[in-house]
Amino acid sequence: MKLSENKKLKMKKKKLEKIIAKSENEIKILEKMIKNEESNKKRKERVNRGMKFYGLAEKSKFPFEYDDSLLVGYFLSFKELPNYKKQELKIKKKPLKNKKLGKNKTLGMLFFNSSLRTRLSTQKAALNLGMNVMVMNFTSEGWTLEFEDGAVMNQGASEHIKEAAEVVSQYCDIIAIRAFAGLIDKEKDNAETVLSGFLKYATVPIVNMESATGHPLQSLADAITMAEHKTEHRPKVVLTWAPHPKALPQAVANSFVQMMQLQDADFVITHPEGYELDPEITKDSKIEYDQDKAFENADFIYTKNWSNYKEYGQITNSDPNWTVTADKMKLTNNAKFMHCLPVRRNVIVTDEVIDSENSLVIEQANNRTYAVQLVLEKILSFLAPKEKTKKKSKKDKK
């Protein structure tokens, strides 16, 4: 029996409605995919911006995707520093709370330069999380590495970064690297040759234990130290240059500046004329060439030497009048003295100042452990396999 025309039309209408509904659903899915793609693109751009100083890269060959919270320098890009400080304080109260988090995970620490606080604090943080730790001093124990692609290796280098990074990645779940600036070739140092080489070829997360241009773990420790001694008013924080017999990198100063730019504080940088840091880092931070004027009513004095950035790696000023003395500290608002250590006593700062009750240098060093532990916890939490929670059936509940 033939269907009536009216019934046929109704069936066609229903069919079209289903097609339309399906199409609309597909459009929603496509829109969501586009939105996610745009979100991923923005996240990748943020990763790339943070990568240079803050040690984690995003690469297609990684067996996992990076989450924003994994970036060592995430707080610098996304203003999460207040949250990080709170988390770090919690870790400090109960450092062994997540002892199982690092079980069966290995941290490989590679040193291209000397270290005391960075090495010991990072190692302690890893042990607090139950990790295995391997340490290698490349300067005395490893092969000389070649970092240039396409190099004809007929000179001093014995191994290329391509093989070295991938091999170490097989032994370790996280690699931490310390490699200072050479202070000879500004372009090479700004390119972060060592760190960038590992970021490019390693297949596991990379943590920056101080690179040619940044020391994020130090600045994170500095942030928590100041938080523990916060003032009731908006604080004045001064980063002051001081003389040193050796040419030193700008890494610590760079990271401190970037960290302070996210603080609610009156921040001032003081140094002799000609000792300006990279303007791309200092941006619109206030610079005062009169140290005494900068010290007036300051609540925190952070002292650090760095070599000349314009006349790259050179010592063009050794004026002892820039040494931080007790008389200069009297200009402040009973300020706390800070320094990353090691420090040249009676060159950078006098004994009277560094040994005073207002000196926070030992507390800063202690907080280095909790700064790196925070970073390792975030990475390990992401690397840890997510347990699938099965819904209990009615029988199980009974």
Image: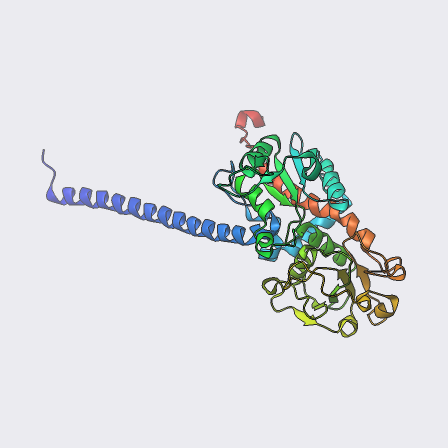
Q: In which quarter of the image is residue 207?
A: top right
Q: Is residue 135 left or right of residue 185?
A: right
Q: Is residue 269 left or right of residue 351?
A: left
| Residue in front for this viewpoint, 139 or 260 | 139
Pinpoint residue 208: horizontal percent, then vertical percent: 64, 46
Question: Which quarter of the rendered picture does the N terminus lie within?
Answer: top left
Q: Which residue lies furthest to the front in this view?
A: 154
Q: Identify the image's colour scheme: rainbow, by chain, secondary structure or one colour.
A: rainbow
Q: Is residue 27 above or below residue 101?
A: below
| Residue in front for this viewpoint, 394 or 240 | 240
Pinpoint residue 174: horizontal percent, then vertical percent: 62, 38
| Residue in front for this viewpoint, 215 or 377 | 215
| Residue in front for this viewpoint, 66 or 350 | 350
Q: Quadrant of residue 272?
A: bottom right
Question: Which quarter of the rendered picture does the C terminus lie within?
Answer: top right
Pinpoint residue 321: horizontal percent, then vertical percent: 82, 69
Q: What residue sits 61% from the left and 30% below the top?
A: 171
Q: In this view, does 25 lie to the left or right of 380?
A: left
